[in-house]
C-alpha cells in the first residue's frame, strides 16, 4: 500500500490541515479520508510514498517465525526423550498453580 496525503477542511470556520492515510489507490484514499474525517472538502490528494520496499521487510518477520516454528519442531522430534518429561513437569506445575490459588 501507498501513503496518501491530502489537505482537508472539516468545519466552515476551521482552518485547512493535512491528513495522511494508507491505501492502495487514490479513490480508496479519498473514501478513507471521507470515512474518518467527514470533511467539507478534500484538496491536493497526492501519493507521498510507495511502501513496496517495506512489504519486503515485513516478509522477513514471517520467514523468521517460520524458521522458529520449524526449529522448534526439529528440537521436539530430535530430543523427544528430553522434551516429553520437561513438558509433563511444566504441565503438572501449571495445573498445580491453577488449583493452588483458590
Image (cartoon, rainbow, N blue to C red):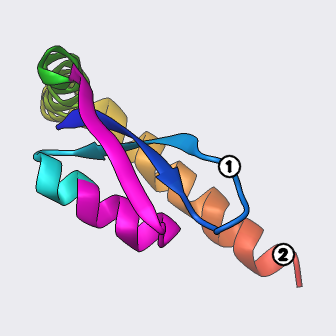
Q: Specify whether residue 35 is painted magenta.
A: yes
Residue bearing mark 1: 15
Apparent side of residue 28 relative to residue 93 in the rendered image (left or right): left
Secondary structure state at the residue bearing disc 2:
helix
Near-viewer residue (43 or 24): 43
Residue at figure coordinates x 22%, y 16% from the top left: 57
Q: Which mark is residue 58?
A: none
Question: Which quarter shows the N terminus?
Answer: top left
* Magenta region: 30-50
Residue at figure coordinates x 10%, y 47% from the top left: 25
Few, some or many residues within 10 Å of mark 2 (<14, 14–19, 20+): few
Q: Quadrant of residue 61?
A: top left
Residue bearing mark 2: 100
Residue at figure coordinates x 45%, y 54% from the top left: 88
Task: Specify whether residue 79 is in view.
Answer: no
Q: Earlier in the sequence, mark 1 or mark 2?
A: 1
Amino acid at each position: 500500500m501507498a501513503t496518501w496525503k491530502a489537505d482537508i477542511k472539516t468545519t466552515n470556520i476551521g482552518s485547512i490541515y493535512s491528513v495522511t492515510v494508507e491505501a492502495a489507490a487514490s479513490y480508496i484514499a479519498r473514501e478513507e479520508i471521507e470515512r474518518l474525517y467527514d470533511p467539507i472538502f478534500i484538496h491536493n490528494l497526492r501519493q507521498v510514498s510507495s511502501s513496496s520496499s517495506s512489504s519486503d521487510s515485513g516478509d522477513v518477520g514471517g520467514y523468521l517465525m517460520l524458521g522458529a516454528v520449524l526449529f522448534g519442531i526439529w528440537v521436539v522430534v530430535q530430543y523427544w526423550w528430553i522434551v516429553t518429561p520437561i513438558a509433563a513437569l511444566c504441565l503438572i506445575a501449571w495445573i498445580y498453580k491453577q488449583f493452588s490459588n483458590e
